Amino acid sequence: MPDGFSVLWCKDADDTALSDIFVSDFTSLDKDKIDSAFEYIRAHNPHITSECVSHAQDAIPVRYPLATTVADGYVVIGNAAFMTKPTSGSGIENTLTAAAILTDVIKKANDFTTSALWQYAVRANLAFGANCYMSYVARSRFQVLDREDLIWLFDSGVLNDSLLALARFDLKNQDDFQIKSILDSVVLARKKPEFIRQIRSILRKCARARILAMRMPILYDEALIKAWKAEYDSFARNEE
Ligand SMILES: Cc1cc2nc3c(=O)[nH]c(=O)nc-3n(C[C@H](O)[C@H](O)[C@H](O)COP(=O)(O)OP(=O)(O)OC[C@H]3O[C@@H](n4cnc5c(N)ncnc54)[C@H](O)[C@@H]3O)c2cc1C
């Protein structure tokens, strides 16, 4: 991935002489930027020509999910409710999960009041919303860190499978867990104390984000929901 793009790929179709190219960024793309992406892709895949068979441009929401997704007789779902994964823009799985939850809630509801539909909001939050909220908080904070520091984080070995398993309290699913990898991480981390302090602060914010999202009121109470929503929005916007 060249500097300045979030996701960029090309894929050859199995049975034709066509290639599919995807260019994206967290900010708007202009013609110069798209041209420079094509140049990069063509330089790395010389079989790709400059002939374009078809193209499309779209926007994908990559913010945290809406706090409130229901009103009397209305629900929002999918992209309209920002149900995409904030790190990748993938939204198909979450949208289909939300659709299944909504179907179930509607089947059981006696009416379509906000109060009856609120269970859809609660179940979608439990199924994926709170995780998306936490990912958004992580991404928005990681995004502004120094690029070289981030490359070091992923390349140096300071973040390794054993450390991640320990952080998840999930050692039983990590067959090759090694205490040496943890010790190596500690030694490496000492080389960049200020950066590691920033990472620790982000991880603490992520934990708070998940707890805050999971505090969504389970039963419909307008005043409680309004107070929770204010906190949810202000924390995500880094106003806390
Ligand atoms: C280029 C690209 C690549 C992507 N790749 C992936 C991927 O690999 N994996 C993944 O999980 N997600 C991916 N996504 C995201 C994913 O497509 C969306 O998150 C998902 O489709 C959202 O579903 P949705 O039903 O909310 O919206 P949509 O799928 O956009 O459906 C909305 C529908 O409403 C219709 N519509 C809009 N306005 C009106 C109107 N006024 N009246 C009637 N109909 C209307 C639209 O025509 C459209 O059919 C990608 C998105 C893009 C743009």
Image: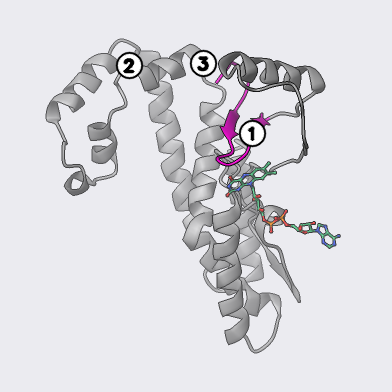
In the figure, is residue 66 to the left or right of 183?
right
In this rendering, the answer to whether 234 lies above or below 125 is: above
| Residue density around tag 3, few if under 14, some if 14–19, many if 20 or more, within 10 Å | few
In the figure, is residue 38 to the left or right of 135?
right
Q: Quadrant of residue 93?
A: bottom right
Q: Are marks 2 and 1 in contact (CB under 8 Å)?
A: no
What is the distance, in whole Å, between disc 3 and disc 1 at their CAs? 37 Å
Magenta-drawn segment: 1-26
Q: Are marks 3 and 1 in contact (CB under 8 Å)?
A: no
Please tell me whether mark 2 sits on a helix, a strand or a loop: loop
Give the image location of residue 161, x and y in percent: 27, 33
Identify the residue at image location x=23%, y=21%: 186
What is the distance, in whole Å, between disc 2 and disc 3 at their CAs? 14 Å
In the picture, which quadrant includes the N terminus?
top right
Q: Badge 1 is on which residue?
A: 17
238 or 34: nearer the eye?
34
| Residue density around tag 1, few if under 14, some if 14–19, many if 20 or more, within 10 Å | few
Q: Nearer the viewer, mark 3 or mark 1?
A: 1
Answer with mark 3 or mark 1, whichever residue precedes in sequence.
1
Q: Badge 2 is on which residue?
A: 156
In the drawing, what numbered circle is on residue 208? none
Amino acid type of disc 3?
Arg
Give the image location of residue 136, x and y in percent: 55, 41
Can residue 19 be found in the magenta stretch?
yes
Q: Badge 3 is on which residue?
A: 147
Answer with mark 2 or mark 1, whichever residue precedes in sequence.
1
Answer with mark 2 or mark 3, whichever residue precedes in sequence.
3
Amino acid type of disc 2?
Ser
